[in-house]
Image: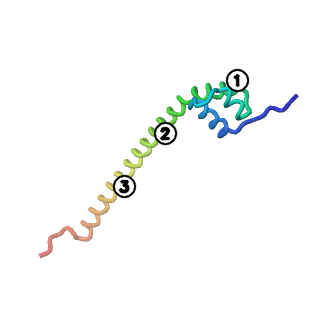
């Protein structure tokens, strides 16, 4: 039984990009890269199908980034409140707020 040849993801991506450009016929690209036209058709179909998830992942990443930003913002406002309380306490304790005359 002959060993099946495997191709790297970057090789597949380059070939699919060439297919999507439609500069050359599929059969010509297949002969240039040494891969059967039917396999190239499957790679192209898979790439097109998975493109939707690529953009969905991007949207999820944006949402996660916004959520992280909101959490950090809440933490910072809480820290500001804590520091203002401490500052007020220190001013009262040391008499800094009293008018000197």
Q: Which mark is residue 30?
A: none
Q: Secondary structure at mark 3?
A: helix
Query: Which residue, as the protein is rendered here, is positioned at the far left?
Result: 101
Q: Earlier in the sequence, mark 1 or mark 2?
A: 1
Residue nearest the viewer, comparing 46 with 16: 16
**What is the residue that sits farthest to the bottom in this orientation?**
101
- Which residue does the numbered mark 2 point to in the structure image? 61
Q: Where residue 11 appears, x then y in whole percent? A: 67, 38
Residue 20: name its quadrant.
top right
Query: Where the N terminus falls, by quadrant?
Result: top right
- Looking at the image, residue 68 sits to the left or right of residue 84; the answer is right
68 is higher (above) or lower (below) than 99: above
Q: Which residue is mark 1?
A: 38
**Residue on which the image places disc 3:** 79
Frontmost residue, 38 versus 70: 38
**Which sits earlier in the primary sequence, circle 2 or circle 3?**
2
Q: Position of residue 95 (x, y in %)?
A: 22, 70
What distance separates the C-alpha of mark 3 from that of mark 1? Answer: 61 Å
Marks 1 & 2, CB-CB < 8 Å contact:
no
Q: Is residue 20 left or right of 71 when viewed as pictured?
A: right
Closer to us: 40 or 97:
40
Q: Spatial distance from mark 2 to mark 3, Cα to Cα?
A: 27 Å
**Mark in the foreground, 2 or 3:** 2
Q: Residues within 10 Å of mark 3 (few under 14, many from 20)?
A: few
Label 1 vs label 2: CA separation? 34 Å
Q: Is residue 100 above or below residue 2?
A: below
| Residue projecting furthest to the right | 1
Q: Are marks 2 and 3 in contact (CB under 8 Å)?
A: no
Label 1: few (<14), some (14–19) or many (≥20) C-alpha neighbours in 10 Å: few
> Does residue 14 appear left or right of residue 100 in this picture?
right
């Amino acid at each position: 039984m002959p060993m099946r040849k495997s191709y790297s993801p970057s090789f597949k991506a380059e070939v699919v990009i060439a297919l999507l450009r439609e500069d050359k016929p599929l059969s010509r690209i297949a002969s240039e890269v040494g891969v059967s036209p039917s396999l190239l058709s499957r790679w192209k179909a898979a790439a097109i199908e998975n493109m939707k998830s690529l953009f969905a992942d991007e949207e999820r990443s944006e949402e996660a980034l916004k959520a992280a930003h909101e959490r950090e913002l809440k933490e910072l406002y809480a820290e500001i409140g804590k520091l203002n309380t401490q500052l007020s306490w220190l001013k009262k304790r040391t008499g800094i707020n009293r008018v000197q005359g």
